[in-house]
Image (cartoon, helix red, strand yellow):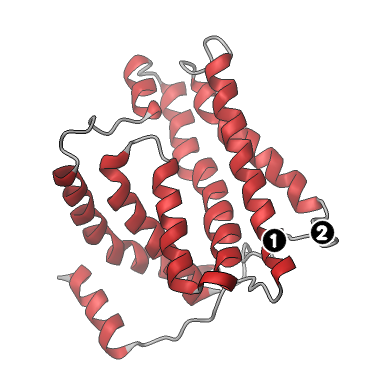
């Protein structure tokens, strides 16, 4: 009932108006800067994933799960201090700041409550549509099954709760979403980045619809909270 009420209130009364994107590209060069930063982060992800596969034993170790996000965050730290086309794009430019934190946390809770039933329904739809595809799996789950110890649990929790979400938000909602919005508009760019967000996850096509829903609501939260 709570979940349905949130959507009804939002759709009917429209209690708030969107504040816009944290960084709205005014020129094609601005969009290119954001796209380049996002592409560098995606490239860092691919390089880190390859290294995890090539270095013997890294994939099965607790550090192996955190290696890719740590590597990407190191690249992000360099990008945040580097000029891209004559301009430095900081995290503050992209909406990462502590101002109004309590209000933003409330937005997050409301967004989660609104998104959860929809994403669960879309996940069920994906499971029905792609029932002949391999069942969704994740390397972190396999790691915990093979190494059910405290170090593995803490490392996976840190990875899943802090490291991975941090760079994913910067890459998809902080870089690609605003970069594409200048050419495609808000809704098409939200849908495209949500598809890319779902496709990059290792669980497979079965969960694309569910993951894409989570990403779409995240785009909405960015657009409404600036």
Q: Is residue 44 above or below residue 8?
A: above
Q: Earlier in the sequence, mark 2 or mark 1?
A: 1
Q: Residue at x 40, y 28 (%)?
A: 140
Pointer 1: what residue?
32
Q: What is the distance, in whole Å, between disc 2 and disc 1 at their CAs?
A: 9 Å
Q: Position of residue 154 (x, y in %)?
A: 45, 30
Left or right side of 203 for 152: right
Name the residue that disc number 2 marks: 85
Taking the image as shown, residue 20 lies to the left or right of residue 25, namely: left
Crowd around label 1: few <14 · some 14–19 · many ≥20 (10 Å): some
Q: Quadrant of the N terminus?
A: bottom left
Give coordinates of residue 191: x percent, y percent.
41, 62
Query: What residue is at 63 percent from the left and 44 percent from the top?
Result: 41
Q: Under tag 1, what secondary structure?
A: helix
* Residue occupying the point 17% across, 46% down: 129
Residue 127 picture location, percent across and down: 18, 43
User: Element at badge 2?
Assistant: loop
Residue 91 visible, this orientation: no
């Amino acid at each position: 009932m709570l979940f349905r009420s949130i959507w009804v209130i939002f759709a009917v009364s429209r209690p708030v108006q969107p504040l816009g994107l944290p960084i709205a590209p005014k020129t094609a060069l601005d969009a290119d800067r954001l796209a380049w930063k996002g592409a560098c982060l995606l490239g860092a992800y691919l390089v880190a994933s390859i290294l995890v596969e090539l270095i013997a034993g890294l994939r099965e170790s607790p550090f192996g799960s955190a290696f890719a996000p740590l590597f990407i965050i190191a690249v992000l730290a360099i990008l945040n201090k580097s000029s891209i086309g004559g301009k430095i794009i900081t995290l503050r430019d992209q909406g990462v700041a502590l101002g109004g934190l309590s209000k933003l946390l409330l937005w997050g809770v409301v967004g989660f409550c609104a998104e959860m039933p929809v994403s669960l329904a879309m996940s069920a739809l994906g499971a029905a549509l792609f029932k002949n595809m391999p069942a969704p799996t994740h390397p972190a789950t396999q790691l915990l099954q093979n190494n059910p110890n405290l170090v593995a649990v803490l490392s996976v929790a840190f990875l899943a709760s802090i490291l991975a979400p941090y760079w994913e938000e910067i890459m998809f909602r902080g870089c690609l979403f605003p970069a594409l919005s200048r050419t495609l508009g808000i809704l098409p760019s939200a849908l495209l980045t949500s598809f890319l967000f779902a496709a990059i996850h290792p669980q497979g096509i079965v969960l694309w619809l569910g993951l894409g829903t989570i990403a779409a609501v995240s785009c909405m939260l960015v657009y409404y909270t600036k």
